[in-house]
Image (cartoon, rainbow, N blue to C red):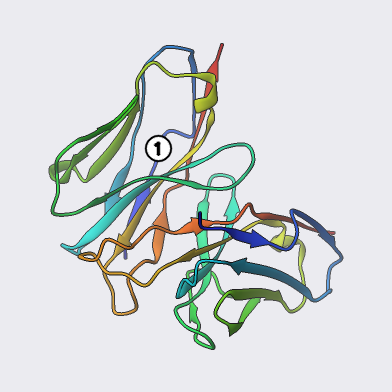
Amino acid sequence: AQKVTQAQTEISVVEKEDVTLDCVYETRDTTYYLFWYKQPPSGELVFLIRRNSFDEQNEISGRYSWNFQKSTSSFNFTITASQVVDSAVYFCALSLEGETSGSRLTFGEGTQLTVNP
Amino acid sequence: DVKVTQSSRYLVKRTGEKVFLECVQDMDHENMFWYRQDPGLGLRLIYFSYDVKMKEKGDIPEGYSVSREKKERFSLILESASTNQTSMYLCASSPWGTVTSGRYEQYFGPGTRLTVT
């Protein structure tokens, strides 16, 4: 069975600090997808990024960057120059390719990020 | 934009009541999902459906059932609500996809916070 672990329950930073959210996953499958979602106080999860198991390239999108390392089964998320609007719960998730579309997600516990002004 | 709507943001029910949570998506997605979110546990899959009248159990189906009579609507039913079903319930939808097609993201509704007293 697959598992996703986000060991950081809560992180608090001051605005403009850089912050890294950790994600470690477990699976025996060789084909899988990793995701990050953001859940602001409004409650609706917002998709941030998807990465497949064959693509270990890091990705940068504005202030966001993701570091995927298969050797350590990690998919960490860094926010550069954090802002108050980044305050949210962030979830890492894993999906396996299966017979029925394969889009079933296994989520980590979530990390509550608070950015203080 | 994809829109997933849930019938209520907040719901209070009594122990033993039959509870219906409704979810509607407007993007003709094949897959629909019900999760519950609890602090420290992340999101856990209750049931999902990949077609009308089709359903599959997720990780925690006990005490729940589902109904999908129309493609756009997926209902979660608590046959006899109990206090341990007090939680945030999130509905999601996604198109049918595979790793190679890239059509994989799940789109979430705003959630229903259910309290069972």
Helix, strand or loop at label 1? It is: loop
Q: Residue A76's x, y, as percent? A: 29, 36
Q: Residue B96 sits in which quadrant?
A: bottom left
Q: Residue A23's x, y, as percent? A: 33, 41
Left or right relative to B12: residue B32: left
Q: In which quarter of the image is the C terminus of chain A?
A: top right
The residue under label 1 is: A7
Q: In this view, does A62 lie above or below B60?
A: above
Q: Residue A96 sits in which quadrant?
A: bottom left
Seen at 24% across and 42% down, the residue is A74
Seen at 59% across and 83% down, the residue is B70
Left or right relative to A83: residue B78: right
Q: How many marks?
A: 1
Seen at 32% across and 65% down, the residue is A1
Q: Is residue A12 above or below residue A53?
A: above
Q: Residue A49's x, y, as percent? A: 34, 45
Q: In this view, does B77 lie above or below A26?
A: below
Instruction: Name the one closer to the observer, B104 or B3.
Output: B3
Seen at 73% across and 63% down, the residue is B7
Instruction: Name the one closer to the observer, A61 or A90.
Output: A61
Type of the residue with mark 1: Ala
Mark 1 surroundings within 10 Å by alpha-carbon count, few (fewer than 14), some (14 through 19), many (20 or more) = some
